[in-house]
Image: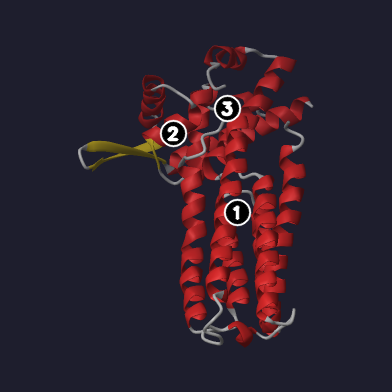
Amino acid sequence: MFANPKYSHNFAKQSTFKMTDQQEQISALKDIRKMMERSSRFISLSGLSGVGAGISALVGAFLAQRELDRFGNSRFGDARAYAPGVSGETDLEFNLICIALGVLVAALSSGFLFTWLRARRGGLPLWDRTTRNMLVNLFIPLFAGGCFVLSLLVNNSGLVAPACLIFYGLSLINASKYTLTDIRYLGFLEVILGIINLIFPALGLIFWTIGFGILHILYGTVMYFKYERKST
Amino acid sequence: MKNPIESLNKIFDSRIRLGVMSVLMVNERINFNDLKQMLELTDGNLASHLSTLEQAALISVHKAFVGKKTNTTYQATEAGRLAFKNHLDALEKMIKNIS
């Protein structure tokens, strides 16, 4: 794509403009724009990854609610009702943690799969410095948030869901500098949702489902139609 | 009116050198292999264009060692940034004049 030096050497000597010169300049500008974008941002992120993660979250939330119902919580039951030690006979916590891990694995693998497919279709490397930059900047706040949420779990705080949403939103905002800028607005939405959730802490699972399930699916669909449909 | 063609920098006639400068405008420092991967070039081809840019003082080269391997990084100089910006302005003007 850059190997066309012979041709462009000639135009400077010509005294009149020709159509091909203009096309040459336009294509040079396009190349510049493409290289700037491709070298600084990870652009293979697929909207379908978001849809996959959202569906995993919805299924997980449904399973978690079923566990809670079986334990006798009301749908909007207060957070303390399923605290560890409430009943020695139930393995509710264990089941919930299994569900959470299952959601994590399903979301990460579908995220990886669709992004890998898109990178392959676009002929771009999946792992290069843009991927590295994006992941490093995503995981700095996410790791801090993960530690924070773990300590909330150990201390039986009911603020797990808002903490997840806020830290996840901040991670997305941080990573958005290194990938598609749309991610930034998804980050804002997650943070706002997390803050509203602070006012209604007992509705944690509902907010969590909206933030990780519904928002991901909506956003993924919009991104898919915006960036991927036209290029296929 | 000044002919905008005169403002075009000859050194950027090459698409490869133009590509290298584009990458260096948005990445503060970048090493040889990342550059090679992004521009999809061979070692020799990229090296010769990099040395042209270095001789024109548009980029600076930093050599360091990671273990026993050399890690050479490249950075656009102030002069390089300015030259690239002027080149873009000239390109833009030319396109506007014709259309």
Q: Is A227 left or right of B5, judged from the image as shown?
A: right
In which quadrant will I find the C terminus of chain B?
A: top right
Residue B8's disc number: 3
Residue B58 seen in this snapshot: no
In this view, the residue farthest toward the left is B68
Q: Is residue A53 above or below residue A92?
A: above
Tell me, for residue A219, which label it has, or none: none
Q: Are marks 2 and 3 in contact (CB under 8 Å)?
A: no
Callout 3 amino acid: Leu
Q: Earlier in the sequence, mark 2 or mark 3?
A: 3
- Quick check: A110 left or right of B32? right
Relative image position of residue A95 (x, y in whole percent): 56, 69
Q: How many marks?
A: 3
Report in which chain the residue with disc 1 lies. A
Residue at x 65%, y 72% (from the top left corner):
A67
Host chain of mark 3: B
Q: Position of residue A84 (x, y in %)?
A: 52, 83
How far across and down, in percent of the image, does residue A208 sit?
67, 69
Q: Element under label 1?
A: helix
What amino acid is found at the position of numbered circle 1 in the picture?
Ala
Q: Secondary structure at mark 2?
A: helix
Q: Amino acid at mark 2?
A: Leu
The single residue placed furthest to the front in the displayed view is: A89
Q: Which residue is mark 1?
A: A107
Q: Which residue is mark 2?
A: B35
> At which x and y percent is residue A10?
58, 12
